[in-house]
Image (cartoon, rainbow, N blue to C red):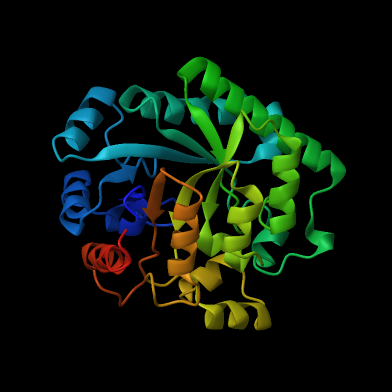
Amino acid sequence: MASIQVATAPCSWGVSTASQAADWVGPLQMVEEIVDAGYAGTELGEFGFLPQDPVELSDLLQSHGLALVAGFVQAPLIEVNADRSHLDRVLEVATLVSAVNPSAWLILSDAIGADPRRTAHAGRIEATDAPSDSEWHALIQAAQTLARAARDQCGLRTLLHPHCATLIETPEEVERFLDWTEPDLIGLCLDTGHFAYAGGDPLTALYKHGDRLRHIHLRDMSREVAERARTEELDYFQAVESGLFPALGQGGLDLQDFLMELEGLDYSGWVVVEQKILPGMDSPAQCAKRNREFLLKMGV
């Protein structure tokens, strides 16, 4: 699978809005550990963790032979048209990413955990949880507004990241979003773990949405934890903290078949390995190495 390029992301080192900054490793240590584990690229991660000066960020990554492959940003999409600050924040990320690598992606997600009902029902979304028609109109309009701004002002292309505990989670919602947005404006970043927990089959997503697929977030999912989370009605964050997304090969997803089918589609983009680091686990560096070794055994 020589055409597939493998990267990782700072969230696999605990760098996220859900973690305390005091728990994060330093940028230099993380970059060195990414390289040592055998990855060729990284995403930007939580804005402000890696250098915000494009020259400094370029020097850091290039000196270690790493590519910047994407910048992830979340925004409460139904609020974007009423609050300019969300657009400004998205453009701040897009401007930095574009300055370092104009061929990278801007990965856009609805705000994670912003809607209490969706957060509580993540992984078991029902029709009564779905956005209303007016909310769908706002979601589509906001996403395309942000994507146009990133393209016109920064030259950066945008992808949707369907994410659990947001308003765009289930396979049906992903399909509706893609049907209602301009194909040349917004592509798809498929996260295997999130899509599976939302009730979808990542392989089916490849066949159905391959023409919009531009970027992969690769993670495994524990079917046992998923079932327990649904039975015990855990919210999204409780499910994740219970081990919903384990190391590659330790969950229930057939990642080998997924990657083989991905190669069959002549996919030549990045596969970004992500893993939640929980208390009691090995260090992020050790987990990153183990995940990379798992992929190497498959020829990736």
| Residue beneath the point at 36% across and 49% down | 4
Residue positioned most to the top: 153
Q: Give the percent coordinates (x, y) of residue 120.
A: 67, 66
| Residue beneath the point at 22% across and 62% down | 285
| The N terminus, quarter of image | bottom left
Please give left or right for residue 197 compared with residue 81 in the image.
left
| Residue beneath the point at 39% across and 46% down | 270
Q: Nearer the viewer, residue 236 or 154?
A: 154
Kindly indicate the quadrant of the structure image that contains residue 36.
bottom left
Res. 113 in view: no
Q: Is residue 228 above or below residue 298?
A: below
Q: Is residue 57 above or below residue 22?
A: above
| The C terminus, quarter of image | bottom left
Kindly indicate the quadrant of the structure image that contains residue 293.
bottom left
Please give left or right for residue 37 compared with residue 69 in the image.
left
Please give left or right for residue 225 compared with residue 103 in the image.
right
